[in-house]
Amino acid sequence: MARFIEGELYLSPDEASAMLGVSYKTLQRWVEAGHAAYWKRINGKRKRAQRKISVTAKFTPTGYRIYKAADIKQLLAEFTEESKNG
């Protein structure tokens, strides 16, 4: 469930990962590592790629992890742009 904290919109792990099309554990690993590892095709061959990411994650008082919506939307835009450019 999305919530506002200090005027910023934050998303639950399920909401954020659904926007990106990955599992919530994949998103968690990316945020903890500070980079996203993924496969991409170049001339019909698969190549492992990485890119640095910056997603703000906060913890609620009960230990629930939430992600800043603006950072998730920016990451989605970067991935979309990258896929268009090949």
Image (tube, rainbow, N blue to C red):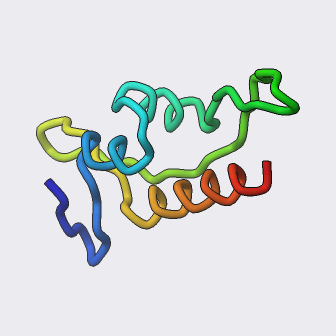
Left or right: residue 36 compared with residue 60: right
Q: Residue at x 50, y 51 (%)?
A: 55
Q: Is residue 60 left or right of residue 24?
A: left
Q: Which residue is drawn at 50% across and 38% down?
A: 31
Which residue occupies the foreground of this view, 37 or 33? 37
Q: Is residue 47 above or below residue 2?
A: above
Image x and y of residue 47, in percent: 79, 23
**Residue 75's image quarter?**
bottom right
Q: Residue furthest front?
A: 44
- Residue 82 in the image: above or below residue 38: below
Where in the figure is residue 79, as x and y percent of width and height? 62, 51
Give the residue furthest to the bottom: 7
Across and down, in percent, residue 36 comes to 61, 35
Q: In the shown orientation, is residue 54 left or right of residue 72?
A: right
Between residues 55 and 40, which one lies in front from this camera angle?
A: 40
Residue at image location 23% in from the left, 67% down from the top: 5
8 w.r.t. 55: above or below: below
Examine the image and state in which quarter residue 46 appears: top right
- 65 sits left or right of 71 in the view: left
- Residue 1 screen position, x and y as percent: 14, 53
Q: Residue at x 72, y 31 (%)?
A: 40
Counting the numbered discs, the total is 0
What is the residue that sits farthest to the right in this orientation? 43
